[in-house]
Every structure is written in C-alpha cells, then in structure tokens.
Amino acid sequence: MPLAGTFAEAAGELPEPLRLLIRDEVGSTNDEAQKLAEAGAADGLVVIAERQTAGRGRRGAEWFSPPGESLAFSLVARPGEPKPMWPRLALAAGVAVAEAIERHGLAAGIKWPNDVWVGRRKVAGVLVEAGRDFAIIGIGLNVNTLEFPPEVAETATSLALETGEPSDRAETLVAVLRRLEVRRRQIGGDFPALLDVVRQRCVLTGNAVRLTTSAGARQGRVEGIGASGELLLRTPAGVEAILQADEIRMAD
Ligand code: BTN
C-alpha cells in the first residue's frame, strides 16, 4: 500500500462504507462519534482527531495520545446482530489492530478483552461504548511516541519503540481500518473464525492472573477463551467464565 502522507489522503484509501471525518481537536473521539451517531450518522463514519483534550480509556481512566505521535479514532457501527453480541466488537478491534501492526514485523498479542500488546507492553487500547441503536468503537494506538508519562512508562510501548523507526500514521490508520472492516463483520455467524484468531493471540492463556469482577476478586490460571468470547479462569473452585473484568494483572 504506497500511501505515505496525511489523514486526508488516507480517506481515499478506505474500503466502503468507511468515511473519515478529520478534526484537529475534540474532547474524546468516542463522544464526538456518539453525538454524530445520535444525530443519524450512518454505519462506517470514522472520527479521527489529532488532539483529544479528554481522551479516556476503560473505567474512566485518562488516555494519553500526544498530537502528531499517536492515533485516536472512533468508528460508528450499526451492527445487524443483536445487542448482546456487540461487546464482541472489542475483540474484533483488538484483532484488527494486531493484524495491522504485524506489517511492521511485530508479533502482536491480545490481552483479553481490550488491549493489544507487543511483548508484555500495551501498544493499543479499545473502548467500545453502546448507544441505543449504535456502537462506538474507539481505538487508541501508540505509533511514534518515545516517552510516556510516569503512570504508564513501565507498561506502555509504541510501534516506534518496538521497531526502532517511525511509522507513517496515515498508512497505519488505513491498515487498521481495512482489517477492522473485515473483523467487525465476524461478531455474528462468523464469530468462530474471529474467536480462533483471538485464541491464537491471547497473551493470558496459560498464565496465572489476578482480576476483579463485579462478583469480587479472583485469582487463577487462564485456560483460554470460551465459545462466547469469555475468559475461562481455573480457580480452586473450578473453571469460571469471566464475562467482564477490571484490570487483569499477570501474577507470574
Ligand atoms: C483502554 O485501553 O482503556 C481503552 C483506550 C481507548 C482510547 C481511545 S482513543 C480514541 C477513543 N477516544 C477516547 O476517548 N478513547 C478511545
């Protein structure tokens, strides 16, 4: 793909029905996309911003995305599948990012359910938020960042840190969106195919972890990913299916 350049040029490289709306500065691209969806924006609108003044991660955490160095964008999706399947979009987005960044020769893993890791560090995060008849898929990807704030300095990485050279952000954006266009269609009947890839890439499988669910803290060993995309955790009480968890920490 010989694109090297600006987001405006990237707009012309996207598959149907994706359209790119480029903003200099917003609070959060997820909020911007949500407003547009509520006003009737069709499936496939992608809002990208150079600067987010209130970019956020899961559980309301701040998301660090320095202008000129990273990618922060959100897709309006109107899936045909029933709403209980929409959380699978987070898996689809993680897989899309992992596949796209492998163009750089990096081995990318999924830290279930929302993070993309290179080595043991986070290179991208996904925030899926559902509205009444739409879902917003927000993706933050560290592309050329070389220094992170102290809070995440030990756990974050970027494509540039991993490859030793800067990457073209517009090219990377197109690569992610092309994969996302394929993977987001697999949350229904084709979900087993998406699951296969999640299972191959899941960095937690086989590892001891500590996590917190709405039912309390858990500690155990991850056996894998179940048929609905849930995490299978072996604890002294047996195998528990984890549907949602706050921060998951490796215990080994
Ligand atoms: C996480 O790892 O906790 C999720 C991070 C998601 C960050 C992206 S950046 C684009 C979009 N806009 C936001 O405010 N958040 C998401």
Image (spheres, grey):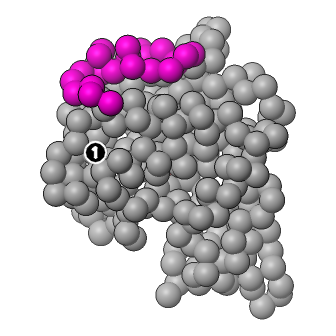
Image side of residue 118 versus residue 190, left or right? left
Which quarter of the figure has residue 122? Answer: bottom left
Which quarter of the figure has residue 25? Answer: top left
**Quarter of the figure that contains the N terminus:** top left
Q: Which residue is mark 1?
A: 143
Image side of residue 56 versus residue 163, left or right? right
Image side of residue 216 versus residue 201, left or right? right
Q: Position of residue 15 (x, y in %)?
A: 50, 20
Above-or-below relation of 118 to 101: below
Q: Position of residue 118 (x, y in %)?
A: 38, 62
The residue most toward the front is 1
Q: Residues within 10 Å of mark 1 (few under 14, many from 20)?
A: many
| Magenta segment boundaries in residue numbering | 1-21
Closer-to-camera residue (113/214): 113
Which residue is found at the position 34% from the left and 58% from the top? 106
- Residue 151 located within the stretch drawn in magenta: no
| Disc 1, SS | loop
Q: Position of residue 211 (x, y in %)?
A: 62, 72
Principal secondary structure, stretch drawn in magenta: loop
Which residue is found at the position 64% from the left and 36% from the top? 184
Closer-to-camera residue (145/148): 145
